[in-house]
Each structure stands twice: as structure tokens, then as C-alpha cells.
Image: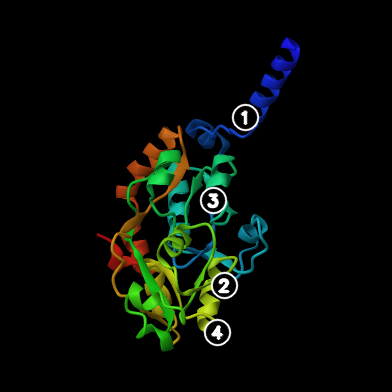
Amino acid sequence: MKRLITLTTLLLCSQFYSQVVQARPYDEIIQSGILKIGVPADYAPLAFFDKTSSDPQASSQSTFAQSGKLVGFDIDMAKELAKQLNVTPVFYITSWPTLAKDLANDNYDIAMGGVTYTPDRAAKFLLSDEIVPNGKIALAACQSAAKLPDLAHIDRPEVKVVVNPGGTNESFVNKNIHNAQIIRVKDNIENIQALRDKSADMMVTDLIEGHYYAYKEPNVLCLATQTPFTGTESYKAYMVQAGNNKLLTAINQWLPKSNKESLAVKWGVQTHLN
């Protein structure tokens, strides 16, 4: 019996430790010459695939087959951070449902590309100082935008709300939408397409992304709400594994010296910077 208990204990311990992956420490990252960066790559203008050009290197490192060049504000910021650390940036494509798990499994050193600071993430990981202030708004097909100025008008049975899994947008929809029709799709790219083809009326997204699409596709995509929903004010940050304090310190020390403001102008998010 004692032997059986000991064996069971060892099995349980081995299962537990198999789920806990130690982050690559800062010194190991520097010595390796590579900074591994995880991005969902469906969040314009922070990190997305530009299908008008190609980038075989970024595409070959994707978890999912993608076409086009990986671009965006956070992609440029990642390259600049890597240059500051004198390492090569290597991008890994993740998804919002698996973002935290992939980071915890040490698939990459830092998560970027639209990560919102939340208390839950802060309890499990380390998050950088503010990158871009933000909040939740309603982005709509333009013919529907004027009819959806607030949550009271949005949360009606005749309204179709599209949402993808795993992120803060889904959390907001699950908490606040009770009467409208919820259409669940696999990723943020399908959200936007649903508005374009009018199979959905609106989606909840971040102010940054909403302004970007409204600017890029006038008369197709419009902001139904101009200011963030009450209580959703937030900011974007970069996320690393708990315990990787030295890497976080290096990120926060670099941020004030980075070209954040000029890159924000380049990618159309400058109006949201403090």
C-alpha cells in the first residue's frame, strides 16, 4: 500500500511538473541571439498579414497557414526591441484562445500584437508599462451604425453581433449581450468579413482597431460608438512569463527610448497616444 501511495504521488507530481514550463531567462535569450515573439496576427493595425505582399519567413513560422507579409505597429516595435537587445526577432503565430497557454508553455518569450492589460493576465504573467491606451467600442456595417449608438440599442433581438473566441471582446459580449443574436466565428478576420458581407450588424472591438478599419474602408465599416463603453477603458501591453522580471525590466527601460510615437503615426494610432 505504501509503495502504491508513493507511486501515485510520483505520478501526480510528474503530471503537475509537466504542465509547468520554466520561461527562458533573459540571459539565455541574449545568449541564444533570438527573441521569440508570439502574435495572434489578426489585429490591424498592431499585427496582421498584409496580403498585398509576401514574407515567406514569417509565413513559414506560422502555426496556421497564412499568406502575405506580417506587418503592423507591434511588429515594428518587436523588431526595434530585438535590435535594442542585439538579437534576431522570430515571430510565432498564436491565437487569442491559446495566447496565454502558449506563453506559459514557453513557445515564445513575449506576447504582443494587441494584448490588453487585465487583472487576470496580471495575476498570471508580467505585463509591461502602457503601450497604447484603448477601450471597447462598437464597429458596425455602415448601414447599421446609426441604429446602434449604445448598448441599449445593440442588445436587441433583431441585432446580429459577431464575435471570435478567447479575447477580451468575447468576454465583453458574454457579459453584456443577452438579447441580441450572437454569431461566433473562429477569428477576428471573420468578424470583419461578416460586417463587410452584412451577415452581421456589428462587433465589439478596440478603439484602435475600430478607427483603423473605419479609416481604411469608408462607407463599409463605421464606428457605431465614438467613445469606449463605460468601464472598458484599458491599455495595450506586452506580456512575458511570471518570474521573467529581467526581461520585463529591459522592455520597460527601452519603451521611453523607443520610436513609439513615430511608429504610431505610421500605423494610424497616434491619436490614441497620451
Of badges 3 and 1, nearer the viewer stands: 1
Q: Which residue is mark 1?
A: 16
47 w.r.t. 227: above or below? above
Q: Quadrant of the N terminus?
A: top right
**Sequence-wise first label, 3 or 1:** 1
Disc 2 target residue? 190
Are there few (<14), some (14-19), or many (20+) residues within 10 Å of tag 3? many
The picture places residue 267, in percent across and down from the top left corner, at 40, 68
Q: Amino acid at mark 1?
A: Phe
As drawn, the residue found furthest toward the top would be 2
**Sooner in the amino-acid sequence: mark 4 or mark 3:** 3
User: Do residues under tags 3 and 2 come within 8 Å of each other at their CB atoms?
Assistant: no
Q: Is residue 35 visible?
A: no
Q: CA distance from mark 4 to mark 2?
A: 10 Å
Disc 4 from disc 3: Cα separation: 28 Å
What residue did someone put label 4 on?
Answer: 197
**Nearest to N terminus: mark 4 or mark 1:** 1
Answer with the quarter of the image where residue 139 lies: bottom left
Counting residues from the start of the chain, the first of labels 4 and 2 encountered is 2
Q: Amino acid at mark 3?
A: Leu
Q: Toward which corner of the image does residue 197 lie, by quadrant?
A: bottom right
* Residue denoted by label 3: 99
